[in-house]
Image: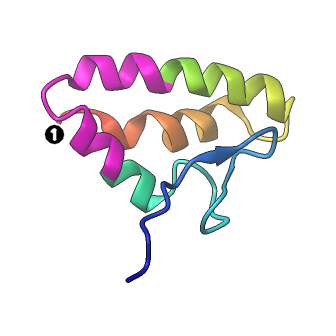
Amino acid sequence: MPRYRPHVAARPSWRCRVCGAAWPCSPARLALLGEYRENRTGLLIYLGGLMYDAAGDLDGQAPPDVLADRFLTWARSR
């Protein structure tokens, strides 16, 4: 039986270590939504910190609006 491997970011590229997609990839998003199910504000604060780190690591490779969509927009309450 295959072992589950968490979809985490490889720094400084901010690509998923498992699937290679831009992180947070779909599996990472699902895992984060589950982990922060009862604390959406906490999730957004956590992701905001990671977005700040990614902006520094990517050093202008991704515009701020793209990083906001990638890290924050999907996690907002609907």
User: Would you name the residue on which mark 1 appears?
Assistant: 78
Neighbourhood count class around disc 1 (C-alpha, 10 Å): few under 14, some 14–19, many 20 upward: few
Amino acid type, residue under disc 1 in the picture: Arg
Q: Quadrant of residue 43?
A: top left
**Up-down relation of residue 66 to residue 53 (above or below):** below
Q: Nearer the viewer, residue 50 or 68?
A: 50
Tell me where the magenta segment starts and ends, as one range.
31-47
Q: Tell me which residue sits at (61%, 64%) in the image.
A: 18
Q: Secondary structure at mark 1?
A: loop
Q: Tell me which residue sits at (87%, 29%) in the image.
A: 59
**Up-down relation of residue 13 to residue 60 (above or below):** below
Query: How many numbered circles does the render carry?
Result: 1
Q: Tell me which residue sits at (65%, 19%) in the image.
A: 52
Residue at far front of view: 1
Left or right position of 54 against 26: right
The quarter in which the N terminus is drawn is: bottom left
The quarter in which the C terminus is drawn is: top left
The stretch drawn in magenta includes residue 42: yes
Q: Position of residue 51 (x, y in %)?
A: 60, 27
Q: Quadrant of residue 73?
A: top left
Q: Tell me which residue sits at (42%, 65%) in the image.
A: 4
Left or right position of 33 against 24: left
Residue at far bottom of view: 1
Q: Position of residue 14 (x, y in %)?
A: 71, 45
Q: Nearer the viewer, residue 69 or 29?
A: 29
Left or right position of 38 against 28: left
- Per the picture, the main secondary structure of the magenta-coloured stretch is helix
**Up-down relation of residue 13 to residue 67 (above or below):** below
